[in-house]
Image: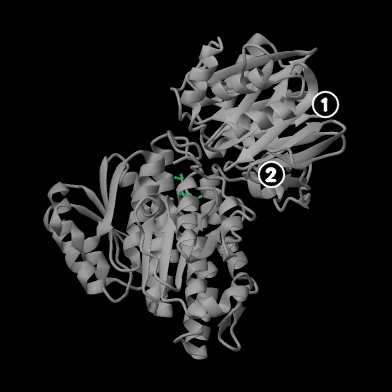
């Protein structure tokens, strides 16, 4: 979602802040703004649209000067997409300037209080309310005013504040919305994501919830919002610059699809004990006894992560023989979920920051579940809330449409299911043989990637169609959902994914002449049944595009177009069958002229409900 970059030091900061902001563009936003303190005066420039629009505006109105400043990309929550509602916001009294990620939930009552005090608002945002509140409480000490204001707020925030009367001070604070502080030599950056910091310094620390940091060029002090001092752990940021740059690809999504073999090699590294048929997951070791006794697994996620969680359900039932369910975390958190004894809740999330998944995990934990995480971003909020977990290790995912994180999530869930299965029902031989198949996956994905040109040509044939169906069964029913989601997200084509058998119960009415229906029809337990479903579509004039197993010539009789994937055990198949669907969505979006990495209305990580 929104992006934050702020700087204090000795350099002119406009350019370096905007470069950082560009690294956060992938998170999704609709407006951008910048502020610096120049000769004791705050100057703010903001605009709807892209960071590039902000740069154009700066060319017209004049560049920002100053060695302290902040900039922001906003994804609208309170108030429409307008210049006024874009951040930074200022107060009307004390020369306060603020940028904010998150939502101040009690902003309406605070606004009434401030209006009674005579403050006049120019935007419809909760952030301006916070600016006014800090201004109202300011009495010569910005840090104290921020702490006092935050004690009055409920909701989520990652904020950076500066003030004309303390022109060398930045104050930042966090609750529920990530903030990193980069520690350089006489200079500091604050950002909502380490990728905006890494080209300046690799030393950084993450603020924890309810923590505040006061930063000047001379140093920093961290405390809680109740002013209790805390000592942060400054650490080396584990991001390589090349991981967050395009490196010859046209889009991050494309780069990340092609990176999947390498990403999975990292997911597997050191985790296969083929000799004794044991999966090695250090992150679970401390909870081995509880995991062996597990009676139920509840998998939680949203979006693509939910699709991985749905595959996880099949994996836990098949490989570990544990009853399992998968759920939208947004629904789970507001139900009255029954958590029996020995339940393991698994949060699946790329970012580790999705608000609903975090809340659902906490709900499950409060009700006695052991909390596991299958997360990509190391040290993220959900990762810190879990009792144990497995990191995906697929590297930073920049493309808004999740690809390599999906295969990483499915792979990691398979490893957890095997780890549990091996301690319950699986023999060493079964486990070793599955691991050997696993090891071949990267090379098999490479074979699918090599068919990219063919996938592009097929996509070209159908790209003008506005309604698509994606159908699969068993392990590849969630893959069908993921294929439909990918197409929707970036090409804005209406696509529905569903279990192939469900089609007969209503959606079949949609099928008309030439409607593309993508079937995941690899060899597996339900192959024949999928064939019958394919014929039902054909009989009504639909055009079938099938994802099939290499060597399956039979399928050509039924499908107009075929994407082949190498043969593999069924539980591992979604990791291969999803790849042509990712490539097809990518090509459809490019052919339709859309900005693949910045799809409209979407955010990379959704940190609000
Ligand atoms: C957003 C993104 C999706 C993602 C979902 C869950 O909606 O646009 O691509 O799948 O959040 O994100 P997470 O970080 O929890 O995996």
Label 2 sits on residue: 207
The location of residue 180, given as percent across then percent down, is 69, 42
Q: Would residue 88 be visible to someone looking at this image?
A: no
Please state the horizontal and vertical placement of residue 303, each as a whole percent of the image: 41, 50
Query: Label 2's element?
Result: loop
Q: Name the quadrant containing residue 135.
A: top right
How many residues crowd around disc 1 within 10 Å: few (fewer than 14), some, or many (20 or more)?
some
In the picture, measured across the screen, residue 480 lies left or right of residue 179, that is left
Residue drawn at x 80%, y 12% is: 39
The answer to whether mark 1 is within 8 Å of ligand 1 is: no
Relative height, residue 275 to residue 358 (above, below) = below
From the image, state whether disc 2 or disc 1 is nearer to you: 2
Q: Residue at x 79, y 20 (%)?
A: 167
Picture disc at residue 470 = none
Q: How many marks?
A: 2
Q: Nearer the viewer, residue 130 or 25?
A: 130
Inter-mark Cα distance, 2 to 1:
24 Å
Q: Quadrant of the C terminus?
A: top left
Find numbered disc 1 in the image and state the secondary structure of the residue it sits on. loop
As drawn, 249 above or below 140: below
Residue 171, given in percent of the width and then of the height, sits at 72, 31
Q: Earlier in the sequence, mark 2 or mark 1?
A: 1
Q: Is residue 196 left or right of residue 596?
A: right
Residue neighbourhood size for the residue with mark 2, other residues' Cα within 10 Å, grouped as few (<14), some (14–19), many (≥20): many
Determine whether, in the image, residue 112 is placed left or right of residue 221. Answer: left
Indicate left or right for 509 with 161 as reference.
Answer: left
Residue to which mark 1 is pinned: 11
Q: Residue at x 57, y 78 (%)?
A: 288
Could you tell me residue 441's position as x and y percent?
51, 70
């Amino acid at each position: 979602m929104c992006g934050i970059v702020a700087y204090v030091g000795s350099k002119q900061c406009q350019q370096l802040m905007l470069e950082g902001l560009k690294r956060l563009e992938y998170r999704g936003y609709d407006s951008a703004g910048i502020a610096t303190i120049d000769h004791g005066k705050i100057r703010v420039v903001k605009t709807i649209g892209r960071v590039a629009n902000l740069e154009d505006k700066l060319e017209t109105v004049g560049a920002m000067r100053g060695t302290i400043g902040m900039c922001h990309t906003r994804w609208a929550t309170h108030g429409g997409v307008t210049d006024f509602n874009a951040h930074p916001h200022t107060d009307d009294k004390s020369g306060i300037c603020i940028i904010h990620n998150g939502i101040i939930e009690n902003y309406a009552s605070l606004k009434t209080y401030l209006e009674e005090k005579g403050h006049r608002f120019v935007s419809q945002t909760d952030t301006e309310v916070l600016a006014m509140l800090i201004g109202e409480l300011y009495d010569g000490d910005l840090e104290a005013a921020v702490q006092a204001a935050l004690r009055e707020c409920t909701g989520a925030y990652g904020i950076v504040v500066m003030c004309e009367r303390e022109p060398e001070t930045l104050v930042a604070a966090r609750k529920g919305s990530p903030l990193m502080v980069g520690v350089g030599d006489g200079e500091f950056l604050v950002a909502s994501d380490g990728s905006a910091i890494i080209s300046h310094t690799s030393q950084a620390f993450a603020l924890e919830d309810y923590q505040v940091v006061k930063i000047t060029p001379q140093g920093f002090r961290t405390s809680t919002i109740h002013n209790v001092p805390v000592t942060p752990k400054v650490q080396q940021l584990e991001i390589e610059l090349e991981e967050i740059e395009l490196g010859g690809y046209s889009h991050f999504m494309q780069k990340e699809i092609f990176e999947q073999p390498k990403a999975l090699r990292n997911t597997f590294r050191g985790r296969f004990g083929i000799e004794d048929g044991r999966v090695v997951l250090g992150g679970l070791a401390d909870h081995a006894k509880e995991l062996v006794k597990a009676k139920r697994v509840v998998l939680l996620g949203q979006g693509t992560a939910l699709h991985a969680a749905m595959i996880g359900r099949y994996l836990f039932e098949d490989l570990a023989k544990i009853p399992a369910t998968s759920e939208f975390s947004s629904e789970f958190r507001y139900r009255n979920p029954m958590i029996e004894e020995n339940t393991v809740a698994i949060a699946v999330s790329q970012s580790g920051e999705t608000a609903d998944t975090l809340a659902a995990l906490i709900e499950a934990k409060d009700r006695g579940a052991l909390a596991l995480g299958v997360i990509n971003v190391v040290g993220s909020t959900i990762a810190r809330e879990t009792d144990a977990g497995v990191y995906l290790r697929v590297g930073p995912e920049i493309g808004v449409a999740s690809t390599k994180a999906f295969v990483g999530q499915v792979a990691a869930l398979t490893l957890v299911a095997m780890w549990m299965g091996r301690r319950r029902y699986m023999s060493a031989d079964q486990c070793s043989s599955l691991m050997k198949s696993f090891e071949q996956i990267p090379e098999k994905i490479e074979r699918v990637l090599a068919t990219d040109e063919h996938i592009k040509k097929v996509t070209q044939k159908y790209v003008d169609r506005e309604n698509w169906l994606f159908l699969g069964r068993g392990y590849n029913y969630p893959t069908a959902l993921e294929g439909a989601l990918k197409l929707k997200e970036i090409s804005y084509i209406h696509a529905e994914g569903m279990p192939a058998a469900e089609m007969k119960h209503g959606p079949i009415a949609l099928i008309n002449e030439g409607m593309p229906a993508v079937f995941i029809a690899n060899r597996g337990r339900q192959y024949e049944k999928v064939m019958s479903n394919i014929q039902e579509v054909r009989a009504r004039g639909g055009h079938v595009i099938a994802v099939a197993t290499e060597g399956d010539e039979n399928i050509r009789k039924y499908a107009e177009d075929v994407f082949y994937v190498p043969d593999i055990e069924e539980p591992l198949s979604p990791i291969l069958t999803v790849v042509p669907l990712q490539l097809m969505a990518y090509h459809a979006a490019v052919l339709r002229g859309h900005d693949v990495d910045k799809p409209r209305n979407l955010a990379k990580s959704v940190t609000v409900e």
